[in-house]
Every structure is written in structure tokens, then in C-alpha cells.
Amino acid sequence: MSTRSTAKRADALRSIDAIVQAAAECLGRNPDASLSEIARAAGVGRVTLYSHFASRAEVVDAAMTRAIDQGNAALDSVDLTGDPQLALARLVDASWHLVDQARALLVAAQRELPPGRIRELHNGPAARVETLIARGRAEGVFRTDLPISWLVNVLHSIMNGAADEIRSGGLTPDRAAAHITATVLAAFTPPGKPVPEPGGER
């Protein structure tokens, strides 16, 4: 490959990276953000944007992929060993704000991408939670009468509900993790067993 071709390729990669970053930021603020707005934020023209992405859906897909990958990387450092209930509390504490931050971007994705693609994008984050829930079930601290996939959805729904409460003024961000954890532990505890106090002795 010639030096000129290498330089063009590097320029193209920089443009793509700038567009995806701008899309994540713009759509994260406003799911209706236009491609023109995204191009301006990326410092490129619409022609350049369309030379890399054939449609709005492709831009949204790339932005959502980046956001999920970054979130997954951030959660890789969370200790999910030991007591499953305490591990769940640590995961909630580390992840609820990521869900909050990606809310508007997810709205954009739901408008542009098929449900199957959105599920595929969330496979990584879901697998982390599924593994923890499965271990908790095996150790007798999480309920087994409901499917794991349902419990994962319950967790995500509660996190999204907390984000809505924060926006409406009904919940402050500093109390969100505790509220989410208390609610999720109550939902995950097997019927007939006492619900543990968040952060308390097991």
C-alpha cells in the first residue's frame, strides 16, 4: 500500500471515529438529532458522512455499538465474585448510570433498528447479568420460578424507571443505586425467604 493510500485510509478512519462519537453524543442528548447535526458535530460534511454510512440506521447502529462496548469495558472491572446478592449490588452501583446515559440513544436505536439487532447488541451486557443470576439461583439466593431472561428484563426496567424518576424530580441521582438495589433484591429473592437489606449482612 502506498504512502498516499495509507494516509487516505487513516483520514477515513478518523472521520468514521469522529462521526460515531458525534452520533453517540448528539443522539444521547436528542434521539431525533439529524444527520446534518451529527455531521456538523463531527466536523465533516454530509457527503463525507454518507461516504462511510449509507443510512441513518447505520449511523445509529455504530453509535449504539460503541456505547455498549464502552459500557461493557467499564463493567469488566466490577467484582462479581462472592455473595451473589452483594455482587448484584455492586453491578447495579456501577451500571445504572450507564443505562441512564444511553436512554436517548436507545430510543433512537428502537426507531431505526429491528428488535433482533437491538437484542444482539445487548447480548454482551445481558450475558454478564445472566451469569450472575444463574450463580445466585444455584446458591439458593435468587428465585428459580421465573426465567432468567425475565429477571434480566426486570433489572433493566427498574433501572430505566429510576432514570425516569430522576428526570421527573422524584429521585435524586445519589439515591438511585440504593433504590434500584433494594427493589431488585426484593424481586429476585425466592418466595417465602426474607428479603435482605441492601448492604447488610447475609
Image (cartoon, rainbow, N blue to C red):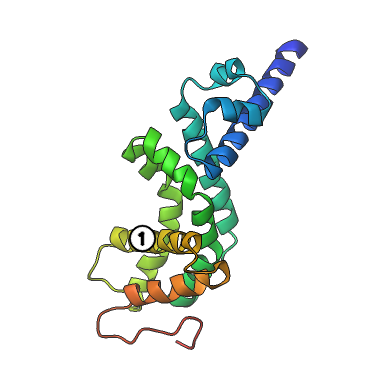
Q: Is residue 145 visible?
A: yes
Q: Is residue 142 left or right of residue 192?
A: right
The percent position of residue 80, horizontal first and vertical second, equals 51, 68
Looking at the image, which residue is at 45% across and 58% down?
Answer: 128
Residue projecting furthest to the left: 145
The percent position of residue 36, horizontal first and vertical second, equals 57, 25
The percent position of residue 151, horizontal first and vertical second, equals 32, 64
| Dot 1 amino acid type | Val
Q: Nearer the viewer, residue 4 or 101?
A: 101
Q: Total of numbered circles in the picture?
A: 1
The percent position of residue 54, horizontal first and vertical second, equals 48, 20
Q: Nearer the viewer, residue 62 or 111?
A: 111
> Which part of the image, by quadrant, shows the N terminus?
top right
Task: Give the labeled residue for mark 1.
Answer: 152
Quadrant in the picture for residue 77:
bottom right
Residue projecting furthest to the right: 3
Q: Where 23 falls versus 147 (above or below)? A: above
Q: Nearer the viewer, residue 29 or 118?
A: 29
Q: Where 4 falls versus 37 (above or below)? A: above
Q: Is residue 81 visible?
A: no
Q: Is residue 147 left or right of residue 184?
A: left
Looking at the image, which residue is at 53% across and 37% down?
Answer: 63
Asked which secondary structure carries label 1, the reply is: helix
Looking at the image, which residue is at 74% across and 17% down?
Answer: 7
Q: Residues within 10 Å of mark 1 (few under 14, many from 20)?
A: some
Q: Nearer the viewer, residue 120 or 164?
A: 164
Q: Is residue 190 left or right of residue 158?
A: left
> Which part of the image, by quadrant, shows the C terminus?
bottom left
Q: Where 78 falls versus 33 (above or below)? A: below
